[in-house]
Image (cartoon, helix red, strand yellow):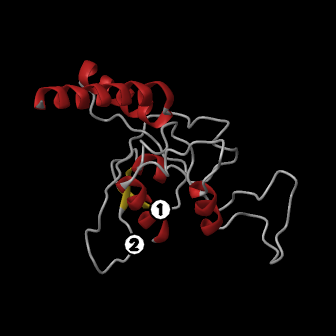
Amino acid sequence: NSDGISDLHEEIVARLTIMLDEHNQLVKSFRMARERIQHHGQSDIKIRLIGRRYSDGRFYNLPTSSEVAALVVGDFDQAMGERDILVETKSGRLQRINELNASYMALQYPLLLPYGEDGYREDIPFSDLGEVKEDGRTTVSIREYFAFRIHDRNHEPSTILSARRLFQQFIVDAYTM
Protein backbone atom coordinates (compact mmCIF):
# COMPACT_ATOMS: atom_id res chain seq x y z
CA ASN A 1 0.00 0.00 0.00
CA SER A 2 1.42 3.32 -1.06
CA ASP A 3 0.32 5.13 2.12
CA GLY A 4 2.32 2.71 4.27
CA ILE A 5 5.42 3.23 2.14
CA SER A 6 4.99 7.00 2.30
CA ASP A 7 4.62 6.86 6.09
CA LEU A 8 7.66 4.62 6.38
CA HIS A 9 9.79 7.02 4.35
CA GLU A 10 8.62 9.95 6.45
CA GLU A 11 9.51 8.04 9.62
CA ILE A 12 12.97 7.16 8.26
CA VAL A 13 13.61 10.78 7.29
CA ALA A 14 12.42 11.97 10.70
CA ARG A 15 14.71 9.53 12.52
CA LEU A 16 17.69 10.45 10.32
CA THR A 17 17.03 14.13 10.96
CA ILE A 18 16.95 13.57 14.73
CA MET A 19 20.15 11.49 14.61
CA LEU A 20 22.01 14.11 12.57
CA ASP A 21 20.72 16.92 14.80
CA GLU A 22 21.97 15.13 17.91
CA HIS A 23 25.39 13.98 16.70
CA ASN A 24 26.66 16.03 13.74
CA GLN A 25 28.31 19.34 14.63
CA LEU A 26 28.02 20.63 11.05
CA VAL A 27 24.28 19.93 11.00
CA LYS A 28 23.92 21.64 14.38
CA SER A 29 25.66 24.72 12.97
CA PHE A 30 23.38 24.89 9.93
CA ARG A 31 20.25 24.34 12.05
CA MET A 32 21.35 27.07 14.49
CA ALA A 33 21.85 29.48 11.58
CA ARG A 34 18.44 28.58 10.10
CA GLU A 35 16.69 29.07 13.45
CA ARG A 36 18.33 32.47 13.98
CA ILE A 37 17.19 33.55 10.53
CA GLN A 38 13.62 32.32 11.19
CA HIS A 39 13.31 33.83 14.68
CA HIS A 40 15.32 37.03 14.34
CA GLY A 41 15.08 37.80 10.64
CA GLN A 42 18.87 37.84 10.36
CA SER A 43 20.18 36.85 6.96
CA ASP A 44 23.87 37.49 7.58
CA ILE A 45 24.52 34.40 9.72
CA LYS A 46 27.68 32.59 8.68
CA ILE A 47 29.43 29.28 9.45
CA ARG A 48 33.17 28.94 9.02
CA LEU A 49 35.06 26.05 7.44
CA ILE A 50 38.55 25.65 8.82
CA GLY A 51 41.14 24.67 6.22
CA ARG A 52 43.97 23.35 8.40
CA ARG A 53 43.47 21.78 11.75
CA TYR A 54 45.99 22.05 14.52
CA SER A 55 44.20 19.37 16.49
CA ASP A 56 42.54 16.13 15.51
CA GLY A 57 38.92 16.76 14.41
CA ARG A 58 37.86 13.43 15.88
CA PHE A 59 38.52 14.78 19.36
CA TYR A 60 37.52 18.43 18.99
CA ASN A 61 34.33 19.65 17.32
CA LEU A 62 34.46 22.41 14.75
CA PRO A 63 34.12 25.73 16.49
CA THR A 64 31.08 27.67 15.39
CA SER A 65 31.35 31.33 14.48
CA SER A 66 29.49 33.99 12.57
CA GLU A 67 30.33 32.81 9.03
CA VAL A 68 28.32 30.67 6.59
CA ALA A 69 29.52 28.08 4.11
CA ALA A 70 27.85 27.21 0.84
CA LEU A 71 28.73 23.97 -0.86
CA VAL A 72 28.07 24.11 -4.60
CA VAL A 73 28.16 20.71 -6.29
CA GLY A 74 28.95 20.56 -9.99
CA ASP A 75 31.08 22.57 -12.35
CA PHE A 76 30.06 26.02 -13.52
CA ASP A 77 32.58 25.79 -16.34
CA GLN A 78 33.43 22.38 -17.76
CA ALA A 79 36.91 23.61 -18.73
CA MET A 80 37.86 24.16 -15.07
CA GLY A 81 38.48 20.47 -14.35
CA GLU A 82 38.19 21.02 -10.58
CA ARG A 83 35.19 21.12 -8.29
CA ASP A 84 33.72 24.49 -7.59
CA ILE A 85 33.32 24.66 -3.82
CA LEU A 86 32.47 28.11 -2.54
CA VAL A 87 32.54 29.58 0.94
CA GLU A 88 30.99 32.95 1.66
CA THR A 89 33.32 35.14 3.72
CA LYS A 90 32.23 37.65 6.37
CA SER A 91 32.50 40.44 3.81
CA GLY A 92 30.02 38.59 1.58
CA ARG A 93 32.58 37.61 -1.05
CA LEU A 94 32.66 34.06 -2.37
CA GLN A 95 35.94 32.24 -1.90
CA ARG A 96 36.83 28.92 -3.50
CA ILE A 97 38.12 26.20 -1.22
CA ASN A 98 39.96 23.03 -2.09
CA GLU A 99 38.12 19.71 -2.01
CA LEU A 100 40.79 18.55 0.45
CA ASN A 101 39.22 20.77 3.11
CA ALA A 102 38.71 18.54 6.16
CA SER A 103 34.95 19.33 6.26
CA TYR A 104 34.22 18.72 2.57
CA MET A 105 33.32 15.01 2.80
CA ALA A 106 31.14 15.49 5.90
CA LEU A 107 29.22 18.27 4.13
CA GLN A 108 28.88 16.27 0.92
CA TYR A 109 27.95 12.96 2.64
CA PRO A 110 26.18 13.68 5.96
CA LEU A 111 24.51 10.25 5.95
CA LEU A 112 27.83 8.44 5.50
CA LEU A 113 29.66 10.61 8.04
CA PRO A 114 26.81 11.28 10.49
CA TYR A 115 29.04 12.68 13.23
CA GLY A 116 30.53 15.33 10.94
CA GLU A 117 33.97 13.78 11.30
CA ASP A 118 36.89 15.10 9.28
CA GLY A 119 37.56 13.75 5.83
CA TYR A 120 41.00 13.62 4.29
CA ARG A 121 43.45 16.39 5.04
CA GLU A 122 47.05 16.56 3.93
CA ASP A 123 48.62 16.46 7.40
CA ILE A 124 47.20 13.21 8.85
CA PRO A 125 50.15 11.48 10.58
CA PHE A 126 50.73 7.75 10.15
CA SER A 127 50.68 7.38 13.91
CA ASP A 128 51.25 9.33 17.08
CA LEU A 129 54.62 7.58 17.34
CA GLY A 130 56.16 9.56 14.47
CA GLU A 131 56.33 6.58 12.10
CA VAL A 132 58.11 7.20 8.78
CA LYS A 133 57.22 5.29 5.59
CA GLU A 134 59.88 3.71 3.37
CA ASP A 135 59.67 6.66 0.97
CA GLY A 136 60.26 9.13 3.83
CA ARG A 137 56.66 10.29 4.21
CA THR A 138 55.27 10.84 7.70
CA THR A 139 51.69 11.53 6.61
CA VAL A 140 48.91 9.44 5.06
CA SER A 141 48.31 9.79 1.31
CA ILE A 142 44.79 10.37 0.02
CA ARG A 143 44.82 6.88 -1.51
CA GLU A 144 45.76 5.32 1.86
CA TYR A 145 43.07 7.38 3.61
CA PHE A 146 40.28 6.17 1.31
CA ALA A 147 41.59 2.59 1.41
CA PHE A 148 41.28 2.78 5.21
CA ARG A 149 37.76 4.31 5.01
CA ILE A 150 36.37 1.61 2.69
CA HIS A 151 38.15 -1.37 4.23
CA ASP A 152 35.70 -4.00 5.48
CA ARG A 153 36.28 -4.89 9.15
CA ASN A 154 34.78 -8.01 10.75
CA HIS A 155 33.65 -6.49 14.06
CA GLU A 156 32.99 -2.95 12.90
CA PRO A 157 29.93 -2.33 10.70
CA SER A 158 30.50 0.22 7.95
CA THR A 159 27.82 2.72 6.98
CA ILE A 160 29.85 3.62 3.90
CA LEU A 161 30.05 0.05 2.60
CA SER A 162 26.31 -0.47 3.15
CA ALA A 163 25.24 2.68 1.31
CA ARG A 164 24.76 1.13 -2.16
CA ARG A 165 24.41 3.92 -4.73
CA LEU A 166 25.67 6.53 -2.30
CA PHE A 167 28.73 4.31 -1.74
CA GLN A 168 29.29 4.27 -5.50
CA GLN A 169 29.09 8.06 -5.62
CA PHE A 170 31.47 8.26 -2.64
CA ILE A 171 33.99 6.02 -4.47
CA VAL A 172 33.80 8.07 -7.66
CA ASP A 173 34.18 11.25 -5.61
CA ALA A 174 37.21 9.80 -3.80
CA TYR A 175 38.77 8.61 -7.07
CA THR A 176 38.52 12.07 -8.61
CA MET A 177 40.12 13.89 -5.68
Q: What is the distance, in whole Å, between disc 1 and disc 2 at their CAs? A: 9 Å
Image disc number at residue 164? none
Give the position of the N terminus as an image quadrant. Answer: top left
Q: Residues within 10 Å of mark 2 (few under 14, many from 20)?
A: some
Residue 105 visible here: yes
Would you place residue 72 above or below residue 48 in this image? below
Q: Nearer the viewer, residue 168 or 71?
A: 168
Position in image of residue 44 (x %, y %): 31, 35
Cβ atoms under marks 1 and 2 closer than 8 Å: yes
Residue found 66% across the figure and 67% down from its top: 141
**Residue placed furthest toward the top:** 39
Type of amino acid under label 2: Glu
**Residue placed furthest toward the left:** 2
Residue corresponding to mark 1 = 99
Residue found 68% across the figure and 36% down from its top: 59
SS of the residue under disc 2: loop
Type of amino acid under label 1: Glu
In this rendering, would 47 be left or right of 100? left
Residue corresponding to mark 2 = 82
Position in image of residue 119 (x %, y %): 55, 52
Position in image of residue 169 (x %, y %): 38, 60
> Residue 94's quadrant in the figure?
bottom left
Residue found 69% across the figure and 59% down from its top: 123
**Residue placed furthest toward the front:** 1
